[in-house]
Image (cartoon, grey):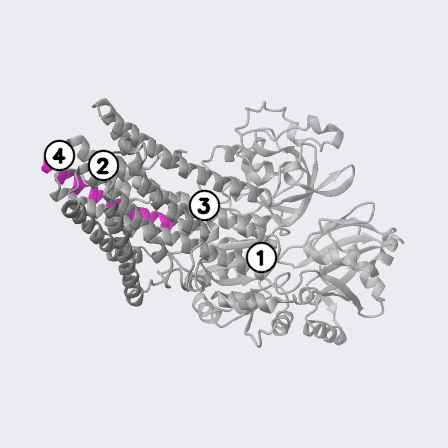
Amino acid sequence: MWHQLRSPLLGLLLATAIVSYFVGERSDALIIGVIVLLSVGLGFVNEYRAERTAQALHAKIHHQAVVLRDGQPQEVEVTGLIPGDVVELRLGDIVPADLRLLQVTGLECGESVLTGESLPVAKDTVPVPAGTPLAELSACALMGTVVHSGRGRGVVVATGSGTEFGKIATGLSGHQLETEFQVGLRRFSMLLVYVAGALTTSIFVINVALHKPLIDALLFSLAIAVGITPQLLPAVVSTSLAAGSRRMSRRKVLVKRLVCIEDLGDVDVLFTDKTGTLTQGRIDFMRAVPVASISPEEVLRLGLLCTETQVTDQGRPVGGNLLDAALWDSPVSASQRSALSGWRRLEVLPFDHERRMVSVTVDNPAGVTMLITKGAPEVVLERCAQVPETARQALDAEFAAANRVVAVATRPAHADTALTSADECDLQLAGLLVFLDPPKPGLAEALGRLDALGITMKIVTGDNPAVAAKVCHDLGMGEVDVLTGTDLDTMDDDQLTAAIGHTTIFARVGPEQKARIVRTQRRTGGDVAFLGDGVNDAPALHSADVGISVDLATDVAKDAADVILLEKDLGVLADGVAEGRRIFANTIKYVLMGTSSNFGNMFSAAGASLFLSFLPMLPYQILLNNLLYDSSQLAIPTDEVDEEQVRRPAHWDIAFIRRFMVCFGPVSSLFDFVTFAVMLRVFHANPTQFHTGWFVESLATQTLVIFAIRTCRIPFWRSHPSLPLTLTALAVVALGAALPTTPLARVLGFQPLPVGFFGAVAAMVAVYLLLVEIGKRIFYGTARAPVPPRPAIGHRHLRRRAAQFSTITRLRRPRPLRRPPAHGPHTAGATGAQRSKAPRIPSQ
């Protein structure tokens, strides 16, 4: 409600109404107060519905954590965590609660969200004294921080607003950085402030100079200012976004902030990964290709052993990556699982995006310790002491067939030696694990839709360049240019800018290289979207104008994204882009119509006050006129949009809006002055009848002009408005014409009009719409709206992570916590039976 009341113009009107009440104009004050409250209430209801829609969408975005309960790993919603739960942390996880660490393996957490420290912080299990500063809690993993590398296990000691992050979040205003759409909306509002200020001041001075009552002059000038302002623009925008978000939700597209819908419509370049986007994302294990004298079954067994995946007593993997899950779920692996019972995994060196490998040390049934390494073939082969040429040929053949390949290598190890990356050398190549991720069926249609929307698609992948090129060829994209991460490292920014335009595939690129590609593209102009779901996609998601991820993505990717796809499908994404452009087009309809007709009517009022001995319309009549007119436009979000309005991105252009207002405002004023002449010369109207006549005529012209302004085509013939918009517009015009005959007429200062006046109004409206149609042809033929230059790149993403780990509702301020004893947060982890006694991290 405060968002509606904080308008300075409404504040001035309320203040003036209060003054009117105390100087004896109580009926005027009451009418103004009621109209203002109706306007505020209408806007509040629509924005409240939009906020509820956003909350409902937020509730559909799921964040999972791997928890040990009753000794078994299982995935649970992070909002269901309770003190005493033991949580597994892996690369890319966002820590879901404050944890006292029990086990760590090379664990480092990025804590910039809490401490501002840009470098990741190494973690261990060594207790620290009570009262240790937040940045030095090395034995704790704090909610909202990101696992940068390694893995760990910790016991939950605080959740929600009881965490260190929650305490900070409850003290924040929740303000987020503006999107380009919001910036444009703000600039447009400032334009109206300047116009309204100039009109208000000049009209007030003129009326005072003509010795009209001071309070009437003040009320009239303020009403003029409110009349030129589209008061319900926030409500129209909110209604459009909320309706659009509901339609997108039905198409399996969720938006984390409603204003991001319009930004999605601005996109003209899309960077996307390959897996699950161009391919089905349902990875199947095909075969094991042995090297040297071992069998395929032994290669498969080594691949099953070398994993970070937690396995339940029933033999089900929990929390693994797609390749490991495919390996475990393959029918051929079922026969090997029983053979793993005699093996014991000792240590794990987790995967990271620099090494691109995972290594484990295991004891075989004979008690022999072995190191197993599994990862990207290029890096594993580099660490092998010797690689047969037949192995390289087999690898090239698999890549040429667009198959995904993982290499497995081994070497002897010592059970009592800590495992480090330095041990990943002098390996013996055991074989290759081959996976199939076929192209998506029907993808050509989705690619065609994106092309029709003017969106250029580029592939950014960590996969082999030959595999990516083969997939693109199979999809009918023809021969495409490819750059690798190694190529990027040899280019400066100018060279990359020159190359990025004609390059379709960027292969074997790391996280920072992806982000650099996105930043470079943004500098060339246009809006950039990035679609990714992995840990290594987070920097690029942050760097893009619109970050897009999927519901099954890693937590850090979903946190960085603005839009979440429940189905990783380019067709779904095309729906979202078209919806964003449709919403922007409908918003601009309201803006163009409101500014032109309002400006014309208020300019007419200003001019009429110069030669009339009375006010051309009473202040509360202007407000009522504005309220009825705006109410009719709340149906604009339901309107149809012409095909050409979604073919390319559209951006705010204040100069274009100003030209439109200046061109079409005088047309509206012309017919207002004709109305004045008819009322005075033909019907010899008294002040009350004059007020009534102009009220009816101005409401009809500025409401019905939406049918001409809503399209560049011929209305009703080549472009049909929606039924709700048609009905509401006609209903408002009918209501305005009927008001003078109702019991409210006397209260509102109206009186019945002659029948002949309605015939004159009908003729004027018809001629007015015809002139607007002619002017529209001339205007759009000579003044196409240019696309404004891109603004400088800034920090556009301000993330609030607390809600996703506690509740979708607003966080409550935590009650003061009693400081625990010195050993409290640093004791051994609590078991499930001890959850009610789990200590908390001490408050700082």
Q: Amino acid at mark 4?
A: Lys
Which residue carries the number 2 mark? 618
Callout count: 4
Q: Is residue 192 magenta?
A: yes
Task: Identify the secondary structure beneath mark 1.
Answer: loop
- Estimate the spatial distance between the alpha carbons at disc 2 and disc 4, rounded to whole Å: 13 Å
Q: Earlier in the sequence, mark 2 or mark 1?
A: 1
- Please state if 176 lies on the left or on the right of 73 as rendered: left
Residue 65 drawn above or below residue 536? above
The tag on residue 532 is 1
Question: Which residue is painted at 67% across and 60% down in the image?
Answer: 281
Which residue carries the number 4 mark? 212
Which residue carries the number 3 mark? 239
Q: Earlier in the sequence, mark 4 or mark 3?
A: 4
Q: Amino acid at mark 3?
A: Thr
Crowd rating for badge 2 (residues with CA inside 10 Å; few <14, some 14–19, many 20+):
many
4 or 3: mark nearer the eye: 4
